[in-house]
Amino acid sequence: MGSTNKLILYTNHRCPWAHRVHIALNELNIPYDEEIIDLDTPRTEAYLKINPRGLVPTINHDGEIITESGIVAQYLADAHPSSHLLPASNAEGGALRRARVAFFVDAFFSKFHSHLGKFVFAKSDEDASAGVEAAVAGLLKEVEPLLKDAGPFFGGSEKLTLAEVSPDRVLRHPRRLEREARHLPGLRGRGLRREGAQLLEVGSGGRAASQRDVYL
Ligand SMILES: N[C@@H](CCC(=O)N[C@@H](CS)C(=O)NCC(=O)O)C(=O)O
């Protein structure tokens, strides 16, 4: 991806999925034009032609449309095989490291993030507590052990990696939800505040979360 290639990012700064792509682009020093998509109104015909799902983020790279934040971040990293985000599969130790990063992202979403929804949309305090407990248990059992050598970043990397880019959005999610909890009946703000603070402290992902503000 040379500097003459044109990249347009369709985004909305409120969207935590889009933040993954902002972070990847900025980490890789890729110049891009930004187009803000209004998520409060129905998507325009023009945008639906670009992304029929109507979601952000989307990138247009030299006329090629790529959607889904995880896939876009992976694509950007793969297009820069010598960057700090992810080694190429044919680099020494590259295949194994890619597997480790992929496993971390899988564990993060399947063992932790999947429980957050149960918490956020719980109809009773019991359900909310069960969601929090499951999320924290998943975090402690499945995610934290993978961050043992995350100093400062995943796998002992000195710089941010794709492992941090991918879960960044959910690590900040609890903080955002804490604000929203005041307005949304049914959200359990108190537990959210406590657990959110705890989650934001977690390992290298927490570091990534704190870096994100410089990107938007
Ligand atoms: N799985 C998608 C999720 C993207 C997503 O849900 N984006 C939200 C904003 S955070 C969106 O575009 N919502 C618009 C809508 O649902 O109409 C990804 O990772 O890119």
Image (spheres, grey):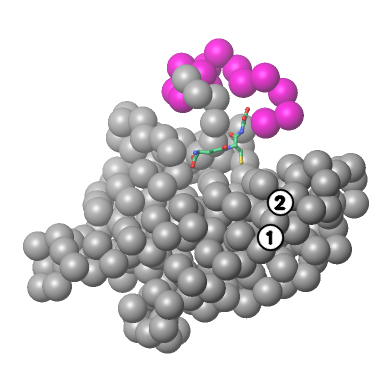
**Mark drawn on residue 208:** none
Q: Name the residue beneath numbered marker 2.
A: 119
Q: Residue at x 24, y 63 (%)?
A: 98
Q: Is mark 1 within 8 Å of ligand 1?
A: no
Examine the structure image and report whether residue 196 is included in the region drawn in magenta.
Answer: no
**Type of the residue with mark 1:** Val
- Residue 24's spot in the image, x, y percent? 42, 57
Query: Residue 212, located in which quarter of the rendered image?
Result: bottom right
Element carrying mark 2: helix
Instruction: Give the image location of residue 11, x and y in percent.
Output: 56, 40
The amino acid beneath tag 2 is Phe
In the image, 41 versus 95, the foreground residue is 95
Left or right? Give the position of 168 relative to 99. Answer: right
Q: CA distance from mark 1 to mark 2?
A: 6 Å
Decide if residue 27 is in sight here.
no
Ligand 1 picture quarter: top right
Residue farthest top in this picture: 45
Measured as percent of width and height from the top left, residue 42 is found at 67, 19
Q: Is residue 39 magenta?
A: yes
Q: Foreground: 51 or 127? A: 127
Position above or below: 190 against 38: below
Q: Is residue 201 left or right of residue 34?
A: right
Secondary structure, mark 1, is: helix
- 177 to 161, vertically: above or below: above
Could you tell me residue 134's position as x and y percent?
61, 60
Q: Is mark 2 within 8 Å of ligand 1?
A: no
Q: Residue at 83%, 46% (x, y): give it.
A: 124
Q: Is residue 213 left or right of residue 83?
A: right
Which disc number belongs to residue 132?
1
- Dot 2 crowding, Cα within 10 Å, few <14, some 14–19, many 20+: many
Tags 1 and 2 touching, CB below 8 Å = yes
The magenta segment is 38-51
